[in-house]
Image: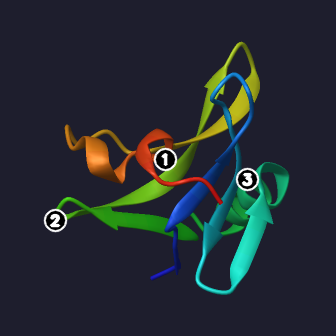
Amino acid sequence: MGLRVLRSKKDDDGDITGLCGDGWSHTKQDAIARIAVDRFAYYVSAGGQTVFVRVGRRNLVPYLTTHPDGTKPNNLDNLPDC
């Protein structure tokens, strides 16, 4: 299993710009590169559910998100700020 994400960095538009856990902080670019090498690089456990972080694309621009599971507490947007 990968690194557990406990918090997320967000810009003024609410876009995820980084991921944080116990003793580590990675930029969006670093996280995307790690996921490209290991698709199980990061995960979120909240609300009794665990999901992996993945790279989505909107207009060819990569962004960080979690696999949809219908549980909001484990969404990157809903995590506390780094």
Kindly state the secondary structure of the residue where label 3 is placed.
helix
Q: Would residue 63 be seen by someone viewing this image from the given angle?
A: yes
Circle 1 — which element? helix
Single out the residue that lies furthest toward the top. 59
Residue 37 percent coordinates (x, y):
71, 67
Q: Is residue 40 left or right of residue 46?
A: right
Quarter of the image holding residue 8? bottom right
Report the Cα–Cα distance between label 1 and label 2: 15 Å
Name above or below for residue 14 compared with residue 58.
Answer: below
In the rendered view, tell whether residue 35 sits above or below residue 13.
Answer: below
**Which image quadrant: the N terminus?**
bottom left
Mark 1 belongs to which amino acid? Answer: Leu
Q: Residue at x 20, y 59 (%)?
A: 47
Per the image, the residue denoted by label 2 is: 48
Q: Amino acid at mark 2?
A: Gly
User: Residues at badges 1 and 2 in contact (C-beta under 8 Å)?
Assistant: no
Q: Identify whether 38 is placed above or below 35.
A: below
Q: Nearer the viewer, mark 1 or mark 3?
A: 1
- Disc 3 target residue: 32
**Exactly how many numbered labels are in the figure?**
3
Residue placed at 76% from the left, 25% from the top? 61
- Counting from the top left corner in percent of width and height, residue 81 is at 60, 53
Q: How is the image coloured?
A: rainbow
Disc 2: CA contacts within 10 A as few (<14), some (14-19) or many (>=20): few
Residue placed under numbered mark 1 in the picture: 76
How many C-alpha atoms fall within 10 Å of the one at disc 3: few (<14), some, or many (≥20)?
many
Q: For the point 67% across and 35% down, which residue is it? A: 63
* Residue located at (73% from left, 53% from top): 32
The C terminus: image quadrant = bottom right
